[in-house]
Amino acid sequence: MSNADASLGADDPADLLAEAQAAIEALGRVRGEVAKAVFGQERVVELTLAALLAGGHALLVGAPGLAKTTLVETVAVVLGLPAARVQFTPDLMPADIIGSEVLEQDEHGSRRFRFVQGPVFTSLLMADEINRASPRTQSALLQAMQEHHVTVAGQRYDLPAPFHVLATQNPIEHEGAYPLPEAQLDRFLLQIDVPYPDKETERRILLDTTGLGRASPSPVLDPLALRRMQSLVRRMPVGEKILATVLELVRTARPGASPDPRVNDHVAWGPSPRAGQALILASRARALLRGRLAPSVDDVLALARPALAHRMSLAFSARAAGVEIETLVDDLAARAA
């Protein structure tokens, strides 16, 4: 651990416990503030916060009008993160996200190129309707999401820390959408499905959002506080049972040696070790959000679908056999428990 990393958290057990208790209290206030603007989506909010606490990116998938954009904007405010929004459209170009070089001439007539930063140079980037841009433009985020820097004209430009992408996506069957490249999907720590609200929640939405006054969330954290919590998450203990469950779940989801014939017959490719990393980190974060100092098997099982489903692909035979990726992941998780 570098000196900079060490400064983000304590190593003494007593200090670690005190740090965890303070984080749990702060995260409770974070959830309370988010709830002022986002109604009845407790699981979606929890998964989004877990992805950020784990240091990763999240893909929010749901029909238009389900408050995905509102959630991202609210999280940025409550976490105190500098944020930018990019509306993905078919004509969006990579330079519109990353930035580009412009030729300038000074007062002496000398010309030089100057790099103009794009909206990716922020702490929380909202990629709105990410699947409406071409694959070429979607791929412009690959280096930024994985390596936290971009390269333009051979020059490296580091992104701020922390750096996270919260992308929204409409279901792929909607007209004018493109499937995300598999390599980019794998960069998202979690894929979070945003469902329709229940009746009582929708009633509250109709009443609270159509009047003159709306509650405004307040900042609870700042970038340094979030980085401290991310460091804490990585230092939380993980039991051997948790590790064994993650290994079993990830490995049985790969075709070729799975005990489930549906995987061997109908899965084109399964999750890489990055999926296991996502499960471990997100399980720690979920435990912290729920006031615990170590993850449980229940955390792993609850995160199996968000961490694995978008990292697997079904073969053409799956449709004829009636195999669905979500049901398959749920069954594999139940077997691994």
Image (cartoon, rainbow, N blue to C red):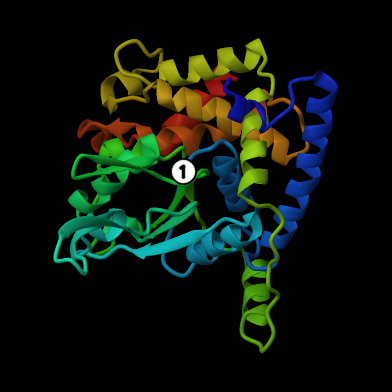
Q: Position of residue 160 (x, y in %)?
A: 47, 47
Residue 332 spot, x, y in % from top left: 48, 24
On-image quarter of the N terminus: top right
In the figure, is residue 233 to the left or right of 17? Answer: left
Residue closest to the eye, 63 or 97: 97
Q: Nearer the viewer, residue 214 or 203?
A: 214
Residue under the image location 77 percent in, 48 percent down:
26
Quarter-of-image position of residue 186: top left
Identify which residue is drawn at 58% across, 45% down: 47
Going 28% across and 62% down the picture, which residue do you hit?
A: 174
Does the image show residue 196?
A: no
Q: Secondary structure at mark 1?
A: loop
Amino acid under disc 1 = His
The spot of residue 214 in percent (x, y) is 68, 79
Vertical order, 312 against 1 (above or below): below
Q: Residue furthest front?
A: 108
Apparent side of residue 334 relative to residue 120 in the rendered image (left or right): right
* Residue occupying image coordinates x 30% and y 62%: 88
The image position of residue 178, as x and y in percent, is: 23, 54
Q: How many marks?
A: 1
Q: Looking at this view, is 85 or 227 the one in front?
A: 227
Q: Which residue is mark 1?
A: 57
Q: Is residue 260 visible?
A: yes
Categorize mark 1 by other alpha carbons within 10 Å: few (<14), some (14-19), many (20+): many
Task: Classify residue 73 as left or right of residue 186.
Answer: right
Quadrant in the picture for the C terminus: top right
